Image (cartoon, rainbow, N blue to C red):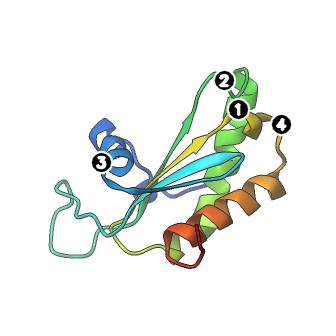
Amino acid sequence: MLPTENRLRRREDFATAVRRGRRAGRPLLVVHLRSGATDPHAPGESAPPTRAGFVVSKAVGGAVVRNKVKRRLRHLMRDRVAQLPPGSLVVVRALPAAGDADHAQLARDLDAALQRLLGGGAR
């Protein structure tokens, strides 16, 4: 499970990541990354934690399928949060094909998208 401090919850934070961040698309998902964004809601001068949010629409499937996809994505992001710069905002949007994908396929697409956004992959 993704820890509470690493979850993206506010609508304006989702909008910031999507509108002002970089985007990498894969067959199963689209990842939006806003690197090192400062959090105006965080107290103190410490670096804010990296936060991730997930968007899984009804196009992916019924409620059971959508919740399964969200659980898998949260689990995958838990292991990858440390790779991202502190203060980053990440939004992972599942595409309709994600409903039929298994855990390994989602992991491959997520890794490829994050690697491209972090400068490791070519367009």
Residue tagged by mark 2? 59
State the residue in front, 1 or 60: 60
* Mark 3 residue type: Thr
Label 3 environment density (alpha carbons within 10 Å; few <14, some 14–19, many ≥20): some
Asked if residue 68 is positioned above or below residue 60 in the image, the reply reads below
**Residue that extends furthest to the front in the rendered view of this protein:** 123
Residue tagged by mark 4? 100
Q: Which residue is pictured at 83% across the width and 36% down the height?
A: 100
Disc 1 secondary structure class: helix
Relative to residue 111, is residue 97 drawn left or right?
right
Q: Earlier in the sequence, mark 2 or mark 3?
A: 3
Confirm or deny contact between disc 1 and disc 3 (CB under 8 A).
Answer: no
State the residue in front, 95 or 87: 95
Residue tagged by mark 1? 96
Q: Earlier in the sequence, mark 1 or mark 3?
A: 3
Confirm or deny contact between disc 3 and disc 4 (CB under 8 A).
Answer: no
